[in-house]
Image (cartoon, grey):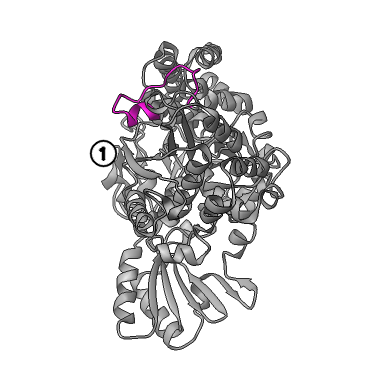
Amino acid sequence: MKKLVVGMGTCGLSAGAQASYDRLRELSQGSECGLSITGCIGMCFREPLVEIREEGRRVIYGEVTPERASEIWNRHVLGGELVSDWVAASWSGGEAGGSERDFLALQKRIVLRNCGIIDPESIGEYEEQGGYSALRKVLFDMTPAEVIEEVKASGLRGRGGAGFPTGLKWSFAAASPGTVKYLVCNADEGDPGAFMDRSVLESDPHAVLEGMIIAARAIGTGHGYIYCRAEYPLAIRRLETALAAARGRGYLGGDILGSGLSFDIRIKQGAGAFVCGEETALFASIEGERGMPRIRPPFPAEKGLWQKPTNNNNVETYANVPWIITNGAAAYAAIGTENSRGTKVFALAGRVARGGLAEVPMGMSINDLVMGIGGGIKGGRTFKAVQMGGPSGGCIPASLGETPVDFENIPKTGAIMGSGGMVVLDDTTCMVEIARFFLEFTQNESCGKCTFCRIGTLRMLEALERITRGEGRAEDITLLEDLAGKIKEASLCALGQTAPNPVLSTLRYFRNEYETHILEHRCPAGSCLALVEFRIDPGKCTGCTLCARNCPVAAISGERGKTHLIDTAKCVKCGRCLSSCNFSAVLKA
């Protein structure tokens, strides 16, 4: 019997998956063909995705509109014909095929093992994949100390950005005295371009819950929180469904499976403050206070949430744990590099051809991620750099593309691993503008507690804005470097300590672009509109008048059917003429 599975993560829904699902539901009524949903398959660039599962073969179709869904139903489901032009990936007799075969072939999926496979709203499908068997092993075959030692031996390090050894962190919380302790899952994913945690929560929430229950057993706590930003409504809804199902099966609540462990989890919705990704600010938010960081020490393992011993890991870290318990620490430690074991999930975004989620062994090179899995740069343009680590990270130039992606080598470039956001940039990207964008983000998100973070980032932002407007001064580069050092040294939490990283990394590798902006009043990438002059190529202009009709200040003149002209004195450089022209006749100089 055939089964249709529709990708219904946020990426799929935003691309129109609901309409495709509704069409398939209409078509399948009264038939023996099953219809189900799944989460993010990872190939976000081909959404909506529909998979057909049948004996000996799986086929994933991409960009499935309701019209295509009807044709796939008639030709494939009813007629047994493979609609090859729309196949994104396929597996038959152990052979992989499809246009996106390379996207999946280079991956090693541990965290994403069930994503795109199971219905995230079905605890039964999770159990069929071995779900909660790791928990049973921990409850009845292992002591808490043995669980901690297994996680230590695996080499798992925190996937939220800092990379602290997970088992060691658990041991600190376990050793802290007190009858009341807390376990926290940080799902406050705030980096621009990052959507790893959201996709895992939407696609395989039980893996995170199982990892948390195992951690609770290891450190000895009965109280858990998932701190998830309110901007993730689908993730929160599926988490709530998963929590209810887990309680119904006896995996959460009092005396779990008769083991004597009592543990339950609550969801705390965050208001979207980036600083609440810092754990002490996150604790303050859960407590109902304003999200602001606290001085450490004492560290959370001693005094965290409500001044009680607390363990905090992110979504991806917890999702690794059931696999480690089931398959053994040695199997996990065999993946990756000596000091960066296992896999890492990355969100590929920006100018990359194949944007989406990819999970790869630690140590894979930037080039293999961007050019291999990501399929290179959109439109065949030149790979210029990759921005890693979000606003706390930095820009790595294409010349360092062979750098292994792990906790040791990425920081040497001036960037950080971060939680896994990877924004790919091409030759049309201005690196000064990129630095300005990320600094504006962190400046807006500063909680204001530290003077250097609150005021220093503002002064840096003002300098960057001057430079991108063509008003930069020669001393601005020195000012940026001086302020960056002081902000890093004087800020209390990681937001301020890392805020200058995008500026420092672009100055390190792309200083010539800063100098060109300041000394020549020119943007080499043609991206900073204040430094660009628009003109019309008479050889390409058809006189369609579209540019003139879109100009907000009537700076474009010309008769229909004849070449148009731009009055540079009137032009406000909004770029609407460029975006509206269908004949590539508007040029930037």
The answer to whether residue 339 of the structure is visible from this angle is: yes
Does 119 lie within the magenta span? no
Count residues near mark 1 (Cα–Cα under 10 Å), then give few for <14, some for 14-19, many for 20+: some
Residue type highlighted by circle 1: Pro
- Rendering quarter of residue 436: top left
Does 293 lie within the magenta span? yes
Which residues lie in the magenta part? 282-300
x and y, in percent, of residue 373 in the image: 60, 54
For residue 159, above or below residue 464: below
Q: Main secondary structure of the magenta part?
A: loop
For residue 509, above or below residue 548: above
- Rendering quarter of residue 504: top right
Residue at the extreme bottom: 79
Q: Secondary structure at mark 1?
A: loop
- Rendering quarter of residue 303: top left
For residue 38, above or below residue 195: below
Residue highlighted by disc 1: 552
The residue drawn where x is 53% and y is 59% is: 133
Which residue occupies the foreground of this view, 289 or 3? 289
x and y, in percent, of residue 486 in the image: 52, 11
x and y, in percent, of residue 156 in the image: 62, 42
For residue 282, above or below residue 362: above
Left or right side of 399 for 499:
left
The residue drawn where x is 52% and y is 51% is: 139
